Amino acid sequence: MLFLVAALMLFGVVLGTVAHVPLTVSAAGAAVIAVWLGVFALREHRARRRRTPVG
């Protein structure tokens, strides 16, 4: 939970910065975040499949 709070605070700082950086830097940051979220979703999906009881 603390990690989520820190991530949201960092997100707020980055949103303020986006207005002042070139579009390529913003696009690269968005790509990094998208990959991070994709990896997180994949890990969560696999973890849920392992916890599901068979039968």
Image (cartoon, rainbow, N blue to C red):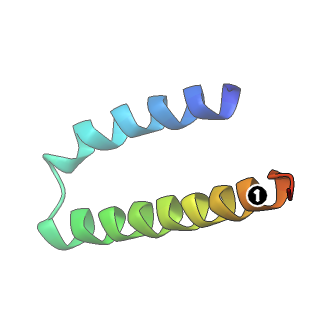
* Residue matched to label 1: 47
User: How many discs appear?
Assistant: 1
Q: Residue furthest front?
A: 55
| Residue at left offset 31%, top offset 72% | 28
Quick check: 17 above or below 37?
Answer: above
| Quadrant, the C terminus | bottom right
**Image position of 2 (left or right of 37):** right
Q: As drawn, is 33 to the left or to the right of 26?
A: right
Q: In this view, does 38 lie to the left or right of 39?
A: left
Q: Where is residue 41 in the image (x, y as percent from the top left)?
A: 55, 59
Residue 27, picture quadrant = bottom left
Q: Residue at x 35, y 70 (%)?
A: 31
Residue 2 found in image quarter: top right
- Relative to 52, 19 lies left or right: left
Q: Which amino acid does label 1 sit on?
A: Ala
Rendering coords of residue 30 (x, y %): 31, 62
**Image location of residue 25, percent across then percent down:** 25, 68
Q: Residue at x 76, y 57 (%)?
A: 47
Q: Residue at x 23, y 62 (%)?
A: 26
> Which quarter of the rendering shows the N terminus?
top right
Foreground pick, 28 / 45: 45
Frontmost residue, 43 versus 49: 49
Residue 6 vs residue 44, the one in the foreground: 44
User: Where does residue 38 sit, x and y in percent of width and height?
Assistant: 49, 66
Element type at marker 1?
helix
Is disc 1 surrounded by few (<14), some (14 to 19) or many (20+) residues within 10 Å? few
Quadrant housing residue 22: bottom left
